[in-house]
Image: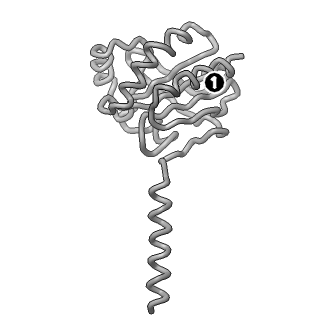
Amino acid sequence: MRKGFLFCVAVLCSLLSFAQNDKGDIVKTGDNMPAFTLSSAVNGTVNSADLKGKVVLINIFATWCGPCQSELAEVQKTLWPKYKDNKDFRMIVIGREHTDEELTAYNKRKGFTFPIYPDPKREVTNKFATQYIPRSYLIDKEGKVISATVGYRKEEMDKLMKEIDKALK
């Protein structure tokens, strides 16, 4: 009986260790971008199939998330001005569990000029990850994920912009 108990404890510890290491990733570097459609009354509809041949930055955030706010402020300040007019680049910012109305009010307060799309039921964001935000995915012109990050650190913005420059060449 003692051996059985010890075995169960070992299995349980192993499972708990695995669960703690799980970042909720579904899409990882090297994977194809999942198929999706997003609609916004303000920004129209975007379909992943229409993004072929473009470098795409997908950012998943929530209005209540502090690190998300810091990241989006930095995107507005440095990244968006540099790439917004590049015909080979597209940025898709997705408000996880937010409606179009909530995002419109949020955007009015924040003054962001990039398009934000609602995903009130996590139908799109759950194709990328099950938990933890902010998340960013950089997709190359062939539709492959070349960078996938969780969280935000200011020093990562320069690295991301270098990756975008390289992918646009």
Q: Residue 68 placed where, x, y %?
A: 38, 29
Total numbered circles: 1
Report x, y in % for residue 85: 56, 7
Q: Residue furthest top?
A: 85
For label 1, the residue is 163
For image coordinates 48% across by 38% down, the residue present is 150
Front residue of 72/39: it is 72
Answer left or right for 25 relative to 147: left
- Give SS at disc 1: helix
Give, as a three-letter code, the residue at label 1.
Answer: Glu
Q: Residue furthest bottom?
A: 1
Kindly identify the residue that appears in the image at 50 percent across and 26 percent down. Answer: 155
Q: Is residue 84 above or below residue 97?
A: above
Quadrant where the image shows the N terminus:
bottom left
Residue 131 position, x and y percent, is 42, 44
Q: Which residue is drawn at 53% across and 10% down?
A: 84
In this picture the colour scheme is: one colour
Q: Which residue is drawn at 44% across and 85% down?
A: 5
Residue 123 rendering spot, x and y as whole percentages:
44, 38
The C terminus sits in image quarter: top right
Q: Residues within 10 Å of mark 1 (few under 14, many from 20)?
A: some
Q: Which residue lies furthest to the front in this view?
A: 155
Q: In this view, does 74 lie above or below 82?
A: below
Res 93 → quadrant: top left
Residue 52 quadrant: top right
